[in-house]
Image: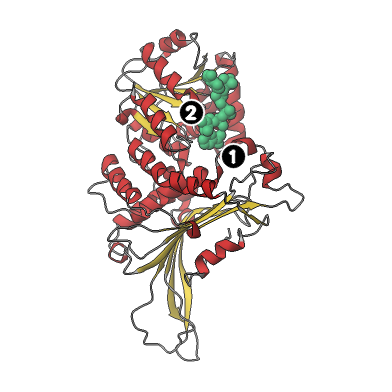
Amino acid sequence: MVSRVIPVEPFDLVVFGGTGDLAQRKIIPGLYRRFWAGQIPADSNIIGAARSELDDAGFQDLARAAIAEFVAKDKHDKKVIEAFLARLSYVAIDAKGKGGWDALKAKMRDGVVKAFYFSVAPSLFGDLAERLHAHKIADANSRIVVEKPFGRDLESARALNAVLAKHFDEAQIYRIDHYLGKETVQNLMAVRFANILFEPLWKSEYIDHVQITVAETVSVDGRGAYYDKSGAMRDMVQNHMMQLLCLIAMEPPYHFDPDAVRDEKLKVIRALDPVKPEDIVRGQYLAGNEQGGYVEHSEDPTSKTESYIALKVNISNWRWKGTPFYLRTGKRLRARASEIAITFREPPHSIFDDAEGWRENVLVIRLQPNEGMNLMVMIKEPGPGGMRLTQVPLDMSFAEALGEEGADIPDAYERLIMDVIRGNQTLFMRGDEVEAAWAWTDPIIQGWEKRGDKPKGYDAGSSGPEDALMLMHRDGRRWREIRE
Ligand code: NAP
């Protein structure tokens, strides 16, 4: 398969927070990879901005080190790296201060795409928007990119939307959820809407239930103070898992167009039922394997923040009534694995005697590791011995199926930044979508806070708290094994 890299228009991209972790680990290496692939025109400029007193060479040195550390060695081409670094410059700016704005303005060119990546704490979004406007650095065609967390509840999300809306139209605001930049996540839409195979079955009549799992092995050690104010519900469910649920559950949009797609996602969020307390299991990992437990990492021995959550979610609309979506995510679990599993119902009548051999059809979409799809189908067990049934996977690893190109799938950030430059908002969350997601999330969190619920302890390296198993057993179902 021939790789098709379509160059974007020349641009000036300002990365506020250019010296920070996200910029150095994801944004700069991602931009370099796109430059290396020939997607970024050579006359594009990337301007780092933060408070640290650095000159251009200092910022280029940081970027050189970031490329060395975070870009695969096969893309380390000295000439390309130097050509890329030559496009980088730096301005010292305090988002809350007065200095540096004129210097930034002087660097920005007319006639190219202007984008501003706010890779800073959300508390600075308002200051940046205000100053970009006041100094006439941004114009009606400029784009701004904002990072998660987009609020910690409906009220704060509304406040963030309001400060951005003061100076930018919704069509200029790109709210990043990097899950939407993952190849497999976009493939969910291709699988559903570019094949006749699945869509006729894509409803409660044929689908028994859906499981969405985002399992991590890492703890919150080192970022406990931040995580303790967030928890799994805010950190994972309200944004990433909600987006996955929407892409599975939404109606076909009339066109693959940003607002058509986002309108359909919004309808799903609005159709979500409130979640009953008995349909929620929260957990906290315990100490083990010579590592501290959650409370040691959070530094609050009484912390009730969940590092794990499992939920049963019902969608009240014609398509999904009667098909629960089970969501679970957690830290310090037995494996790093993210997947969506769609379990189909039994055939209406079995003509075979081997009832024991029968298993449900399951479509598994793996997000990580090894992006790909697996369709579990029933076949005859090979060999003599009568008509016995067995289940086999129709396995498609994207990397294998797509050959070299598959092995070189762009990272989510690379793809999303290129979409910003192209002016395509399809894979970015719209303001009303984010607010609707918080409007569903808030009462769930308020419910457990009011009841004073404590998370259940679970062993590090396990599949989560025992009670989460019951959430499924009770309904005569079981979780899929968490494994890489
Ligand atoms: P970080 O490592 O703490 O970096 C923050 C950046 O902001 C630094 O470059 C810092 O540089 C700059 N900064 C701080 N105060 C400033 C001010 N008043 N004016 C101008 N620049 C200022 O944080 P990060 O991890 O990169 O995260 C950045 C944003 O992305 C946050 O909103 C975070 O929630 C979000 N995010 C991060 C990740 C990740 O993997 N890191 C993932 C998802 C979302 P100076 O100190 O030199 O000013």
Instruction: Please give the label number shown on residue 122.
Output: 2
- Rendered-image quarter of ligand 1: top right
The amino acid on which the numbered mark 2 sits, given as a three-letter code, is: Pro
- Count the numbered circles shown: 2
Sooner in the amino-acid sequence: mark 2 or mark 1: 2
Local packing at callout 1 (Cα closer than 10 Å; few below 14, some 14-19, many 20+) is some
- Label 2, ligand 1: CB separation under 8 Å: yes
Q: Position of residue 418 (x, y in %)?
A: 39, 34
**Which quadrant is home to the C terminus?**
bottom right
In the image shown, does 343 or 471 lie closer to the viewer?
Answer: 471
Mark 1 lies on residue = 227
**SS of the residue under disc 1:** helix
In the image shown, does 445 or 390 lie closer to the viewer?
Answer: 445
In the rendered image, the residue lying farthest to the front is: 451
Instruction: Please give the label number shown on residue 74.
Output: none
Q: Quadrant of residue 351?
A: bottom left
Say if 301 sits above or below 346 in the image.
Answer: above
**SS of the residue under disc 2:** helix
* Side of 124 relative to 316 (left or right): right
Say if 241 sits above or below 97 in the image.
Answer: below
Q: Position of residue 117 (x, y in %)?
A: 44, 26
The amino acid on which the numbered mark 1 sits, given as a three-letter code, is: Tyr
Q: Image point 41% across, 11% down: which residue?
A: 105
